[in-house]
Amino acid sequence: QVQLQESGPGLVKPSQSLSLTCTVSGGSISSGGYYWSWIRQRPGKGLEWIGYIYYSGSTYYNPSLMSRLTISVDTPKNQFSLKVSSVTAADTAVYYCARGGAHCDGDCYLGYPFDYWGQGTLVSVSS
Amino acid sequence: QSALAQPASVSGSPGQSITISCTGTSSDVGGYDYVSWYQQHPDKAPRLIIFDVSNRPSGVSNRFSGSKSGNTASLTISGLQAEDEADYFCCSYTGSSDVMVFGGGTKLTVL
């Protein structure tokens, strides 16, 4: 059973960077096939896909956020990370890591569902 | 404003059936069979309940079903139970920008 766990600071000051890490257990990121995503949910709002990464380091970002995003992978640690720069109060949200968004098995299947999720971590942006 | 339109709320009595709609465009819902649905209980992570429009993951009750017509996807829950009270989100791949887009969510109340 694949499990994901987010970690990182719960409070970030405006204009600084938000950094989160997702640790995957029960499966290896480097075994390939799956993309690994970040998704956020602002308070009382819906879900917003942020971006995803493949074990090779290939990334794809939501165009609405991409100028401030960096997603990276550390295969030896079986982790992937998110960095959002120049944060504002609008970045206050519960951040989830999840498996999915795309899947490659020879050909790549964009639109693969998010089948495993972390429990989520609340990040507040405030001075 | 979310990319996919869902009703803010629906309600039903135990044992009844309800349907939640998810309306997009020909660039997302209407153009691809990559619609998924997620159930989210308060303060919990979302849970995948339908993928590829109408497929259920292992372990998901067959009371949950999905369908699509044109640019609108639908989630139907039959035989409503108290435990079904939750928020439901649809999600679709969009070819116009190669991203995944979600609906705004629908709160289901079991009366």
Image (tube, coloured by chain):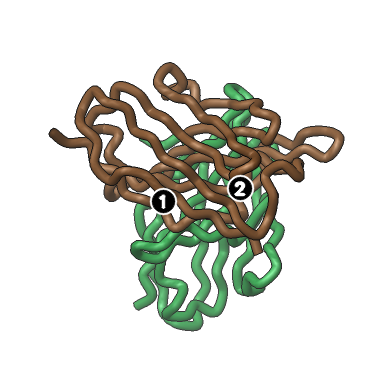
Which chain is assigned brown?
A
- Same chain for marks 1 and 2? no
Q: How crowded is mark 2: few (under 14 residues within 10 Å), some or many (20 or more)?
A: many
Q: Where is residue A25 in the image (x, y as percent from the top left)?
A: 61, 56
Point 34% across, 78% down: residue: B111
Query: In the rendered structure, which amino acid carries the disc numbered 1?
Result: Gly
Instruction: Give me the chain letter of mark 2.
Output: A
Point 66% across, 34% down: residue: A54
Q: Residue A10 carries which label?
A: none
In the image, is A77 to the left or to the right of B44?
A: right
Residue A46 showing in the rendered view: no
Q: Position of residue A109 (x, y in %)?
A: 75, 37
Point 63% across, 64% down: residue: B65
Q: Chain B is drawn in which colour?
A: green
* B62 shown above or below A112: below
Query: In the rendered structure, which amino acid carries the disc numbered 2?
Result: Arg
Q: Label 1, label 2: how many angstroms apart (C-alpha)?
A: 20 Å
Residue, far front: A76
In the image, is B85 to the left or to the right of B78?
A: left
Camera-near label (1 vs 2) is 2
Report which residue position mark 1 lands on.
B105
From the viewer's side, name the closer residue of A46 and A49.
Answer: A49
Instruction: Give me the chain letter of mark 1.
Output: B
From the viewer's side, name the closer residue of B2 and A16.
Answer: A16
Residue, far bottom: B15
Q: Position of residue A90 (x, y in %)?
A: 26, 32
Q: What element carries label 1?
A: loop
Residue, far left: A127
* A117 shown above or below A88: below
Report which residue position mark 2 lands on.
A99
Q: How crowded is mark 1: few (under 14 residues within 10 Å), some or many (20 or more)?
A: many
Q: Is mark 2 on a helix, strand or loop?
A: strand
